[in-house]
Image (cartoon, rainbow, N blue to C red):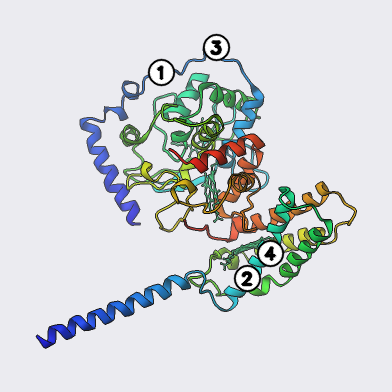
């Protein structure tokens, strides 16, 4: 409750600022020019697309829960600090889904959190993570998405309360918190850990849950992957090098846990992590699981 | 004068007491679980021990032993059979990580227990001549049923 109040205050402030300096909200192209969103020289790799689609967990949000739900047709409602946010249909249907989009539109959504018409997406869509993915990997996911059966059902939309329903406010949020592109990845890391860093920060979107957030919902980079600061939704830390979680785990403990959900003491993960393992991480190749373990053990940001 | 020092003294005493109760409260948050909550945590830990032994075989950290694997399956099944009794209504005190859904969706909780029973029975009854990959597939089935129940019915751990 307090959190929501703080968020509301923060966003009101943000909205006020929008008038002064946050033209960003209304004229996104001024702040997010279409840098590097072209498709020149792209060679499709559908297998890689199918793999990253699974590791990236697109279906765990975009498919409604329960048997018989149509894959990627949306309909799930996410409870977030902003309020309830509905997840859209991303099948190739031209009306209900994203079948009418171009590859550039898709890159803009995944990298910049912008819709084709320039609307800002809520960060409940983990584009803050996906922005770290390479252009070719994103385009491979796009290639894969086009092979999914189109579903003509429009996903229901939930209206948020003021001020969260004003998407322009998100422009300022993004100016503050969206770190676009591959810039910060993989400094001073050996090859295995670099691949792991890429998977953890990009498709794996681990930070979305494992990095605590400030009052405005931005990541506390100084506590990268350190788990929650208490609160009603606890999440453990997964940064052993800095003494934050996974105490006494070795590399094989980590990669085994990611692929099977089994912890070194014979326990198994539960709650949201069980879903993440079942739907996303159990599909990891052994090499990629080992790379993620190597990165988590070194735990540089 | 007398009065103030008394007061300070009392405050120190109060602080000390508070310190004690806080420390005790902290311990009660998990290790201090008592009664049926402690019993079920112990049952879970026993199963965890058996799973750990199986995982070591799967990872090749200890030699594969079909006999030991089926025995681990029996240990788990033994606990699974009595599990429901360890979740009586109202046993969700502070020290417990059980979600309220255990009791609001009791039918599904029963089904999750039945799934564990079935999976562990399959491992316990595995053919002694079965190869490592077959036995390990049965072990994976047990692991799935642990995870499946924890997904829906157990609060996440902090830190």
Furthest residue toward top: A41
Mark 4 or 1, closer to the camera: 4
What subunit carries mark 1?
Answer: A
In percent of the image, x 59 and y 54: which residue is there? A269
Q: Is residue B13 above or below residue A77?
A: below
Mark 2 or 1, closer to the camera: 2
According to the picture, the residue beneath numbered tag 4 turns out to be: B47
Where is residue A147, by image quadrant? Answer: top right
Badge 4 vs badge 1, beta-carbon distance below 8 Å: no
**Circle 2 SS class:** helix
Toward the viewer: B12 or B90?
Answer: B12
Question: N-terminal of the two: label 2 or label 4?
Answer: 2
Residue B61 x, y percent position in the rendering: 71, 50
Q: Which mark is residue A35?
A: 1
Question: N-terminal of the two: label 1 or label 3?
Answer: 1
State how far apart marks 2 and 4 are (Cα). 9 Å
Toward the viewer: A178 or A157?
Answer: A178
Mark 2 neighbour class, 10 Å CA radius: few under 14, some 14 to 19, many 20 or more: few
Furthest residue toward left: B1
State how far apart marks 2 and 3 are (Cα). 59 Å
- Is A171 left or right of A276, judged from the image as shown? left
In percent of the image, x 73 and y 63: which residue is there? B114
**Circle 3 SS class:** loop
């Amino acid at each position: 409750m307090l959190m929501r109040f703080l968020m509301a205050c923060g966003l009101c402030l943000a909205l006020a600022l929008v008038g002064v300096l946050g033209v960003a909200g209304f004229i996104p192209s001024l702040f997010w020019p279409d840098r590097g969103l072209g498709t020149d020289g792209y060679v499709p790799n559908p297998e890689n697309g199918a793999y990253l689609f699974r590791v990236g967990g697109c279906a765990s949000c975009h498919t409604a829960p329960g048997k018989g739900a149509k894959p990627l047709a949306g309909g799930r409602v996410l409870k977030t600090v902003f309020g309830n946010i509905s997840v859209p249909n991303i099948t190739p249907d031209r009306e209900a889904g994203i079948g009418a989009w171009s590859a550039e539109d898709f890159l803009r959504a995944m990298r910049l959190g912008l819709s084709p018409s320039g609307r800002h997406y809520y960060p409940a869509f983990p584009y803050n993570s996906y922005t770290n993915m390479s252009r070719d990997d994103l385009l491979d996911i796009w290639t894969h998405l086009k092979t999914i059966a189109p579903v003509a059902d429009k996903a229901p939309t939930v209206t948020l309360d003021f001020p969260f329903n004003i998407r322009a406010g998100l422009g300022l949020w993004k100016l503050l918190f969206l770190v676009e592109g591959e810039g910060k990845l993989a400094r001073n890391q050996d090859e295995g850990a670099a691949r792991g860093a890429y998977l953890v920060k990009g498709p794996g979107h681990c930070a979305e849950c494992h990095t605590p957030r400030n009052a405005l919902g931005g990541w506390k980079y100084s506590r990268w992957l350190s788990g929650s600061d208490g609160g009603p939704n606890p999440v453990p830390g997964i940064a052993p090098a800095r003494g934050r979680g996974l105490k006494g785990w070795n590399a094989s403990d980590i990669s085994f846990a990611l692929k099977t959900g089994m912890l070194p003491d014979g326990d198994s993960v539960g709650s949201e992590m069980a879903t993440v393992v079942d739907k996303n991480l159990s599909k990891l190749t052994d090499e990629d699981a080992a790379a993620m373990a190597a990165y988590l053990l070194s735990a540089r940001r | 004068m007398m009065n103030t020092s008394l007061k300070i003294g009392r405050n120190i005493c109060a602080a000390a007491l508070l310190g004690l109760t806080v420390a005790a409260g902290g311990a009660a948050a998990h290790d201090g679980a008592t009664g049926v909550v402690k019993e079920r945590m112990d049952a879970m830990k026993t199963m965890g021990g058996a799973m750990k032994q199986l995982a070591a075989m799967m990872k090749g950290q200890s030699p594969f032993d079909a006999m030991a694997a089926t025995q681990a399956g029996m240990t788990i099944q033994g606990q699974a059979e009595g599990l429901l009794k360890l979740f009586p209504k109202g046993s969700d005190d502070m020290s417990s990580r059980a979600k309220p859904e255990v009791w609001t969706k009791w039918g599904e909780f029963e089904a999750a227990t039945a799934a564990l029973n079935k999976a562990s029975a399959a491992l316990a009854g595995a053919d002694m001549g079965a190869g490592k990959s077959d036995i390990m597939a049965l072990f994976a089935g047990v692991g799935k049923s642990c995870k499946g129940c924890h997904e829906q019915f157990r609060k996440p751990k902090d830190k």
